[in-house]
Image: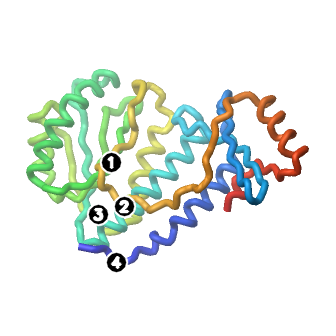
């Protein structure tokens, strides 16, 4: 079924502009971030941009990522609801005796493939977005937005049978904005938790979770590395040749 046009569909351009505004106002403090260069030979413009690190360990970037995922949750929820799908919030927990984060994640990595296989059999074509949460005095939790409409009892029984905790809950979603609020809330709660293992993804989605279509950047970007002196020298050379040098992402609009 094709979804009717969502008001959020027009946010693609707005989202790009918002990204540019945030990047130009960036407060990322991570050292050794590389510079990128692109050229417009016809207009004789050269761009030198230094992207944010986009890591959860950076206070500025963590907050921008939280906002990014809040938007994607709202966009996806809106698209799915308009397509006729039903949505639910689902909370899964680790076993009540496991409080150590590495142990909880080890159990999750074994249990999730088993549980998700049962899930897909029970709800073919299921779509989801989930967030992992862990805080002091709080068990490892996973919060899910999903098109599955299974009852709480199904999650309790199947989670326990696959190695997770018996505590689970499923609640129906009525509005897309609830999806964004849900994601923003739980990412915010765990935003300063730094004990996650390397390469752990705090947010995961199914392959077909709806995302806005982004226009491809026609420019070819070259990574110059983190050396400011190299960038300064290159910029001066372009200026001497009569080129315009841009260091603001607003110039790309």
Q: What's the CA distance linking mark 4 and mark 3?
A: 19 Å
Residue in view at x 77 percent, y 35 percent: 231
Q: Disc 2 vs disc 4: Cβ atoms closer than 8 Å?
A: no
- Real-space Cα separation, disc 1 to disc 3, in angstroms: 17 Å
Residue at 68% from the left image edge and 33% from the top image edge: 224
Between 75 and 154, the one nearer to me in the picture: 75
First in sequence, mark 2 or 1: give its number: 2
Residue drawn where x is 65% and y is 55% of the image: 20
State the residue in front, 207 or 101: 207
Q: Residue at x 30, y 50 (%)?
A: 207
Does 220 appear above or below 94? Answer: below
Q: Secondary structure at mark 2?
A: helix
Q: Position of residue 97 (x, y in %)?
A: 22, 24
- Per the rendering, the mark at residue 76 is 2
Query: Of marks 2 and 4, which one's residue comes earlier in the chain?
Result: 4
Discs 2, 1 touching: Cβ within 8 Å: yes
Tell me if label 1 and label 3 are in contact, CB under 8 Å. no
Q: Give residue 173's mark.
A: 3
Q: Which mark is residue 205?
A: 1
Q: Are marks 1 and 4 in contact (CB under 8 Å)?
A: no
Residue at disc 1, secondary structure:
strand
Q: Are marks 3 and 2 in contact (CB under 8 Å)?
A: no
Task: Give percent across and percent down for residue 149.
Answer: 17, 59
Front: mark 3 or 2: 2
Q: Nearer the viewer, mark 1 or mark 3?
A: 1
- Percent coordinates x, y for residue 142 in the rendering: 30, 41
Q: Earlier in the sequence, mark 4 or mark 3?
A: 4
Q: Please, is residue 156 above or below residue 88 in the view?
A: above
Q: Which residue is mark 4?
A: 4
SS class of the residue under badge 4? loop
Using a 10 Å C-alpha cutoff, classify the residue at mark 2 as few (fewer than 14 neighbours), some (14 to 19) or many (20 or more).
Answer: many
């Amino acid at each position: 079924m094709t979804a009717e046009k969502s008001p959020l569909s027009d946010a693609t351009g707005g989202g790009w502009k918002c990204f540019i505004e945030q990047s130009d106002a960036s407060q990322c403090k991570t050292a050794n971030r590389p510079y990128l260069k692109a050229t417009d030979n016809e207009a004789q413009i050269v761009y030198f941009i230094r992207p944010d690190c986009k890591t959860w360990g950076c206070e500025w970037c963590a907050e921008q990522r939280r906002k990014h995922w809040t938007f994607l949750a709202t966009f996806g929820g809106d698209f799915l609801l308009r397509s006729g799908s039903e949505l639910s919030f689902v909370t899964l927990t680790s076993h009540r005796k496991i409080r150590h984060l590495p142990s909880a994640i080890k159990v999750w990595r074994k249990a999730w493939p088993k549980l998700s296989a049962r899930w897909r059999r029970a709800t073919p074509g299921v779509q989801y977005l989930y967030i992992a949460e862990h805080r002091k005095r709080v068990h490892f939790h996973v919060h899910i937005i999903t098109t599955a409409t299974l009852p709480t009892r199904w999650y309790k029984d199947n989670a326990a049978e696959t190695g997770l905790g018996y505590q689970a809950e499923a609640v129906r979603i009525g509005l897309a904005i609830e999806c964004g609020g849900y994601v923003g809330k739980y990412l915010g709660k765990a935003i300063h938790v730094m004990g996650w293992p390397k390469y752990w993804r705090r947010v995961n989605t199914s392959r077909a979770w709806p995302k806005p279509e982004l226009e491809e950047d026609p420019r070819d970007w070259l990574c110059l590395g983190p050396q400011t002196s190299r960038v300064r020298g290159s910029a001066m050379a372009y200026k001497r040749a009569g080129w315009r040098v841009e260091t603001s992402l607003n110039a790309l609009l």
